[in-house]
Each structure stands twice: as structure tokens, then as C-alpha cells.
Image (cartoon, helix red, strand yellow):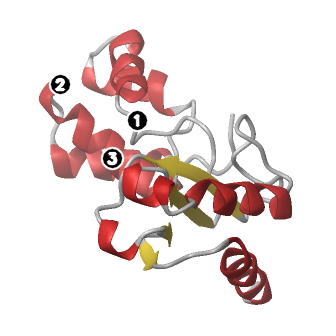
Amino acid sequence: MNETFDFKVVDSIIDKLGYKESAIIAILQSIQEHYSYLPKETFPYLSKKLNISEANIYSVATFYKNFSLEPKGKYVIKVCDGTACYVKKSIPILDRLRKELGLSESKATTDDLIFTVETVSCLGACGLAPVLTVNDKVYPDMTPNKAAELLKELKDEQ
């Protein structure tokens, strides 16, 4: 059992949002907001508490791309690869971030859980392309060198 998983946290979320199947998305969102991902202990616990099959809860968690079953880093960096950003060369930015952090398409989070690098289809800031966000703070007009400098600043904050 994961020592950091606190059933009291989940109970308070359920108490607030309700013991009904229709609340499952909001419950999962709140759990993920607390832990930054959905711990595996979530599924059997919610199944018992809400009388919903684990398979149904898991299917909701895996259907929506917003949910993560893997721990994420303290800094979640999202690189836009939508049309405007792609045309303005967002992929070299992504490649540089991955290289600097030792990450790849299949390994998105550093072992120390400090950084997660993801791609997103659009951040809604096309006029500022290429764009990335760090924990939802927008960084416009990025270049590979600016991204590397941003990483250095974030590492220095540690």
C-alpha cells in the first residue's frame, strides 16, 4: 500500500461531492488535484465506497486524457504541438527539453519527480506561438535556448 495515500482525503472529497455515480468525474478530478495523479489505491477504495465496479471507474479514468495514472513532477511542462506552434517550430523545443531532462516520448517524468514534459494539441495562445506552460503559467515565443534557460531557473528554485 502506498504510504502517501490518505483515505481521509478521499473520504472528505466524497463527502463534499456526494456518494453517487454521477459524481465520479468530479471525485477523480479532486483526487488528482490533491496527488497530481490517480494512485492505484483509488480504484478499489472508490469502488467499495460508491458501489461502482473498479472497471467502470478505471474506464472513466483512462477515457479522459486529463487523468493520469502515473505520478507527475512538481513542474508539469506542456509543450503545444498544435498547428500554430508546430509551424513556428515547437518540436525542437520539446526535443531540447527532453534531452536536457533525459526524457523521451515514452518517459515523460524525471525519476526525482521534479519535471514532467507533455505535449498538448492546443494551449489556446496561438498568437504567442510557440508556447509552453509550466504548471499552467504561459511562456510565449519560446525557443530551444529559452526553454533550456527556463529549466535552469526552475532547477535553481529547488
Checking the image for residue 65, the label placed there is: 1
Determine whether, in the image, residue 53 is placed left or right of residue 135.
left
Identify the residue at horizontal 49%, vertical 79% (top origin). 141
Disc 2 + disc 3, Cβ < 8 Å: no
Secondary structure beneath label 1? loop
- Counting residues from the start of the chain, the first of labels 1 and 3 encountered is 3
Q: Position of residue 6 (x, y in %)?
A: 53, 49
Q: CA distance from mark 2 to mark 3?
A: 14 Å
Q: What is the secondary structure assignment of the residue under circle 2? A: helix
Q: Which mark is residue 29?
A: 3
Give the crowd class for mark 3: few <14, some 14-19, many >=20 residues within 10 Å.
some
Indicate the amino acid at tag 2: Glu
- Residue 52: image location, x then y, percent: 28, 15
| Residue corresponding to mark 2 | 21
Furthest residue in direction front, as rendered: 87
Residue at mark 2 to residue at mark 1: CA–CA distance = 20 Å
**Nearer the N terminus, badge 2 or badge 3?**
2
